[in-house]
Image (cartoon, rainbow, N blue to C red):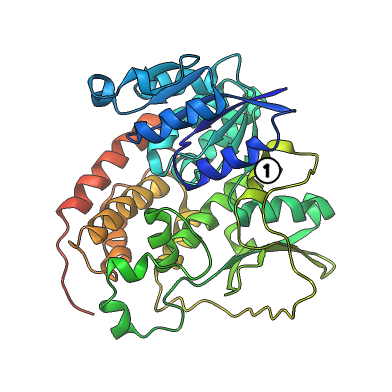
Amino acid sequence: MKRIAVLGSTGSIGTSCLEVLDGLLDQMVLVGVSAHQRWEDLAAQTHDFSPRWAVLSDTELSGVVRRSAFSEKTELLFGADELSRLASHVDVDIVVAAIVGAAGLQSTIAAVEAGKTVAIANKETLVVAGPQVVELARKTGAKLLPVDSEHSAIFQSLQAGKGREVKRVVLTSSGGPFRGATREQLASVTPDKALKHPTWEMGPKITVDSATLMNKALEVIEAKWLFGLEPEQIEVVVHPQSVVHSFVEFVDGSCIAQLSPPDMKLPIQYALTWPDRMECPGPKMDWSSTWSLDFHPPDRELFPALDLGYEVARKGGTCGAVLNAANEIAVERFLQGELNFVDIPRVCRAVLDAHNFDPSPSLSELVRLDVWAREETTRWKSSRSI
């Protein structure tokens, strides 16, 4: 029996993961779950699965939650340190890192330090500290398995050839809800409009990232570290149907792609059952219907976030931590009505340019710059111009 801990179990990835696990209980057991503040949802999960541990990372909730709401079989813990202890515990085999943003970095690193198999749904870990995490995994023997649909597709497609035979990988993007929009239309985008993704159901932060194409920028950086690629080997194409999740082009011209309906259960399950495949609760392709699959290049002038991703992938060092932190706060301020939609890549550009670049930072320096970038972004004033 594989013993699974799901960090961020109340989010969109976490709940999909538990749905997958529900069909694999003859092979896997859920031993730990975590949330930041959604304690009632977490409590319900303890009754459904009876995990050994449940962790709430917000310590202020320790005097608020009702212990009686949780399963008697589950030990309730509080704080980021307990989250890391869960991720590194000897009785955990696979850690699903599904905490949104840089908040998931500490626990993911703890899992890697302990040599766990880490199913990475938190792309920010590799964006912020890609070289450090990859090197740590090499030393400890930890396995890094992608959960993002795009990186899972690349991971699956890479098995058709050898690493030295890869010419490039191509990340597909739905283009978000504003594909084909004008600059004037983007200037008037509201949070409600940005949160209406045409093909995926996701949390608010990643949905806005999809609308700005910042999610593709972060995925470019993640792909570099996850697969040992040069930025020039990574391309992005817009694919509105979200059926081809990414593909690999080999040196002989062969392109191997992974196709499935836009649903996260398949990549989640593949990370849990790898190297095996099993029946999955996700939807299947309907080949009795007519399909039309379109691909076209992204508008990098209208969506400048993508170029930021390539720049950070090329420079490395402290750039990833700064870009990620600035984007997290910019998205938060946009959702609160404090910034325009078009301000998000602008403030990221400004904060990235203003930081003191270090090509070989320590983890403590990355943490310090994460805090600095958040403060800078909080102070940034919108020009309110198109």
Identify the residue shown where x is 40% and y is 83%.
181
Q: Residue 307: x, y in percent?
A: 45, 67
Classify 75 as above or below 226.
Answer: above
112 over 14 or under it: above or below: above
Instruction: Please tell me which residue is depicted at 64% across the width and 28% down the height of the picture.
Output: 142
- Position of residue 42 relative to residue 267, above or below, is above
Please state if 118 lies on the left or on the right of 86 as rendered: right
Q: Is residue 332 left or right of residue 263?
A: left
Kindly indicate the quadrant of the structure image that contains residue 185.
bottom left
Considering the image in quadrants, where does the C terminus appear?
A: bottom left
Above or below — where is 352 with respect to 113? below
| Residue displayed at 71% across by 50% down | 155
> In the rendered image, is residue 161 in sight?
no
The percent position of residue 304, horizontal first and vertical second, equals 39, 71
Could you say where residue 52 lies in the image, as x and y percent from the top left? Answer: 53, 17
Q: Secondary structure at mark 1?
A: helix
Q: Which residue is at the front of the view, 192 or 169?
A: 192
Q: Which residue is mark 1?
A: 269
Kindly tell me whether residue 349 is visible in this rendering: yes
385 sits to left or right of 137 = left
The amino acid type of the residue labelled 1 equals Gln
The N terminus: image quadrant: top right
Whether residue 203 sits left or right of residue 268 in the image: it is left
Query: Residue at horizontal 45%, vertical 63%?
Result: 210
For the residue pair 113 and 195, the one nearer the viewer reads as 195
* Dot 1 crowding, Cα within 10 Å, few <14, some 14–19, many 20+: many
